Amino acid sequence: MAAAAAGARINCFLNPINPLNSTRLTTHLHFRLSKKTFSARASANDPFVLTTPLYYVNAPPHMGSAYTTIAADAIARFQRLLGKTVIFITGTDEHGEKIATAAAANNSSPAQHCDLISQSYISLWKNLDIGYDKFIRTTDPKHEAIVKEFYSRVLNNGDIYRADYEGLYCISCEEYKDEKELLENNCCPTHLKPCVARKEDNFFFALSKYQKRLEETLAKNPNFVQPSYRLNEVQSWIKSGLRDFSISRALVDWGIPVPNDSKQTIYVWFDALLGYISALSDDMEQPSLGRAVSSGWPASLHLIGKDILRFHAVYWPAMLMSAGLGLPKMVFGHGFLTKDGMKMGKSLGNTIEPNDLVHKFGSDAVRYFFIREVEFGSDGDYSEDRFINIVNAHLANSIGNLLNRTLGLLKKNCQSTLVIDSSTAAEGTTFKDTVEKLVEKARVDYENLSLSSACEAVLEISNAGNSYMDGRAPWSLFKQGGDASEAAAKDLVIILEAMRIIAIALSPVTPSLSWRIYGQLGYSKDQFDAATWSDTKWGGLKGGQVMAQPQPIFARIESQTEEEKRVQAPEAPKKVKKNKLPKPQQVVEA
């Protein structure tokens, strides 16, 4: 991509600054930079703005896209529980050569293709219970207006010039590549396809002049790129020397025209990154860059896959510096989802169809598995057997069965009515302390984006509840009557209070399941929607509250092997009953 790449031939036309002379370039332009582009920590009244990437619509969404968005939704829901004003931005990136090629392959126009694929993202997000606030499409005229205004601002700052470029181009990445980063036969290491030789007359962004500013920003703000090992990658890229990159394409028609040359279109990344700002203007009749920025920028968190880290942690901050705008507070690069040890991606043809998973297992199961079982930031592998085992053990057994058997005992022995306040019931027990410690751990984990650990902490509450239930054996205490029966009734209140807390604490990850738990505890949907993290404090259930009739909140998933065995198993021959005295029935412990 860079104008200084080996084999490049450069002739400057507009701004006669030689991109090969990065030292002089930096010296010549450095005085124009704003001294303050990285915003201070947000105040309590600032909105929490988080973004997913704008997904490329060359093909329908895959599980990798869904994973990023599920994680972002969990973070957004947690921040709302804290009482924050949240602006959750997602959307689709709809320009570029790959889009035009994909549309032609399907005998449709680029616009028709974009409409179709963009809608498939919206439908999937609905199926996955994604509660986004803004959905931006880069073909939106409001977005185009802001991109052109941003481009002009950077141009006026002297950071855009014209040059010839000749090099190896990956069509899938829509990016020029250095030969040293390519595999055998000039194959792209990401898409495993040969790059093509290409020569163009393009406009370039003077990235090299921002090298020192970027180095200083990362040194002063080590949390800007997370996890920390991603920061190390970014610092290594910058240290190796930044080179200017092309921000226009002369051979691509499907894109936003360059303001000062209508024969060229703006490079897809220079276009798409602005979607994070233009999304803030979607309700404005006459959008402007300034008004969009004042509506929530800078973002609190960019959530991305690690393969697009360079664009978000190097190119994007430099572009913002050039335009005099604040930088996002954090860029978090998570790992890849793999299948059979390989990264899943549309270009590789080995994706998992997320709609199929949702239709087969439900949104809660899909959301829970990928958040709980993939340590956020690291790579994770999908296996259907592991998926079923984890979801059954955690959601159906540990959480679902605990609620169901507790409500069953309450119905049988207390007419589904709580006999005492949960705060009073827990006096003298250590169980309440255990729950409170785990709730606090979950809160800290959510805040630190340790989403898997947050799930684990909430699951530990249900595990502790099951241990408490088994140790106390209230079904036996009820049989004894008197004080023992009263103690058993208190035990049920204690367990149900823990279930109430689980419903809130797990709601960022499994919103539908959490509502079903809350509903069985006698609450309305409005009460569930109004719950905040402060409601995880012990003592919410009150004496006299009537619980709903027990119903399974999460059906156990049968594996294909189990189902086949059940269907194929021959019927056992019926035995002739002998006249025997009936034996006393054993009580099945709930």
Image (spheres, grey):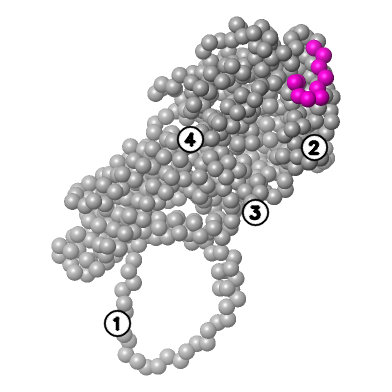
Give the amino acid at mark 4.
Ala
Give the amino acid at mark 1.
Pro
The answer, for residue 527, to whether it is visible in the render is: no
Q: Neighbour class for label 2 at 10 Å: few (<14), some, many (≥20)?
A: many
The residue identified by callout 2 is 186
- The image shows residue 582, relative to residue 190, as above or below, that is below
Which of pointers 1 and 3 lies earlier in the amino acid sequence? 3
Picture quadrant of residue 146: top right
The residue identified by callout 4 is 76
The CA distance from mark 2 to mark 3 is 25 Å
Magenta segment includes 343: no
Q: Position of residue 115 (x, y in %)?
A: 71, 35
- Residue at 57 percent across and 20 percent down: it is 214
The CA distance from mark 2 to mark 4 is 41 Å
Give the magenta part as a residue range. Answer: 3-12
Picture quadrant of residue 236: top right
State which mark lies toward you, 2 or 1: 2
Q: Position of residue 313 (x, y in %)?
A: 59, 27
The secondary structure type at the circle numbered 1 is loop
* Mark number, residue 375: none
